[in-house]
Amino acid sequence: MIVVLKHGVAENKKQQLISWLEKQNLRVNVSEGDYQTVLGLIGNTSHVDTDLVASLAIVDSVKRITEPFKCVNRKFHPEDTVVEARGAKVGSGNFALIAGPCSVESEEQIVEVAKAVKAAGATMLRGGAFKPRTSPYDFQGLKAEGLELLRVAREETGLPIVTEVMGVRDLPQFEDVDVIQIGARNMQNFDLLKEVGRMRRPVLLKRGLANTIKELLMSAEYIMSEGCTEVILCERGIRTFDDYTRNTLDLAVIPLLHELSHLPVIVDPSHATGLARLVPPMALAAAASGADGLIIEVHNDPMSALCDGAQSLRPEEFASLAEKIRAVRKAVAE
């Protein structure tokens, strides 16, 4: 249920209503806009007398929400959410360009790539320390050492770091991570989602390989229901019957998610296609479709990469793409 207050309501009157609603065993999410204030009621609202609430002098309207997701719902929070990490913003016109290698391999590698992508216009540095792999025999990441090397790269460049957590037991090592990534395989690891939500840190949530838009939003709801207010939704392709690409990139999800949710939406063309030559056209298409950012794999020597070299751009290729992305966004804005 949402309660829309009239413009210019006195603060003490608003607080009195919030206090009364909380006494009904409801949690109240307050969204302050330029022209209206929306109170999102979370919990069992079946016992709330909507006619009584609507009759109050400070209330403009009352609506029941049928969707199961509440915190992520744009009806609860009409204004776009802006997620910020060390000054880098994403959402509501702030475009995030997140770039870096699939996995951290050495200090020389991650620092070199970090400097290169920053010079090209990247706003955040991605890099895997804990790597989920289909085969148990593939490179699993440097783990704690990889996290430390990411911090070194952050010190060298100032770029906030984005890296994936694999399980609840690893979370204590992520206290200093700027944006915690939940990978596609963990999108419905609900215990992990709840624990990450309690950390109250920015979260990048990737859509699962075979999950619906509603399931993605419900996973985000798990995170936000624990108190986290900064979640970035990421489309990274879904598994279909086609096998020419690694996955099928669903660009229609961008405007749909913007209609349904206030959270920023970014796209991962690297994992969606699995082929470096397809990353630029898909990145440009995503930018033209209204994405709030891109997360792109960049490696200084893709042929020698320990993970996903086939889909990684070289630094010079990323720099060229970044220029084109800026041109596309400018053209769309005009």
Image: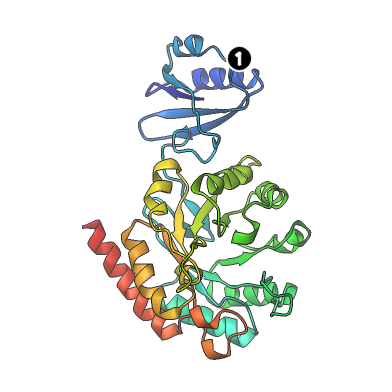
Percent x, y of residue 250: 42, 58
> Who's the residue at 64% across and 18% down the image?
24
User: Toward which corner of the image does residue 95 lie, by quadrant?
Assistant: bottom left
Residue 171 in the image: state x and y as whole percent. Answer: 73, 59
45 above or below 247? above
Q: Please state the horizontal and vertical placement of residue 245, each as a whole percent of the image.
A: 46, 72
Q: Residue at x 57, y 43 (%)?
A: 218
Identify the residue at image location x=39%, y=43%: 259
Q: Would residue 138 appear left or right of 120 to someone viewing this image?
A: right
Residue 306 sits in quarter: bottom right
Q: Quadrant of the C terminus?
A: bottom left
User: In the displayed structure, would residue 37 be above or below residue 115?
Assistant: above
Name the kind of residue labelled 1 in the image: His
**Vertical relation: 6 (above or below) 144:** above
Is residue 122 visible to us here?
yes
Q: Position of residue 22 (x, y in %)?
A: 63, 22
Query: What residue sits right under mark 1 in the picture?
Result: 47
Towards the viewer: 278 or 170: 278
Res. 97 visible in picture = no
Numbered marks: total: 1
Q: Residues within 10 Å of mark 1 (few under 14, many from 20)?
A: few
Residue 107 sits in quarter: bottom right
State the residue in front, 117 or 76: 76
Quick one: 267 or 52, which is closer to the camera?
Answer: 267
- Residue situated furthest front in the rendering: 241
Q: Is residue 40 left or right of residue 200?
A: left
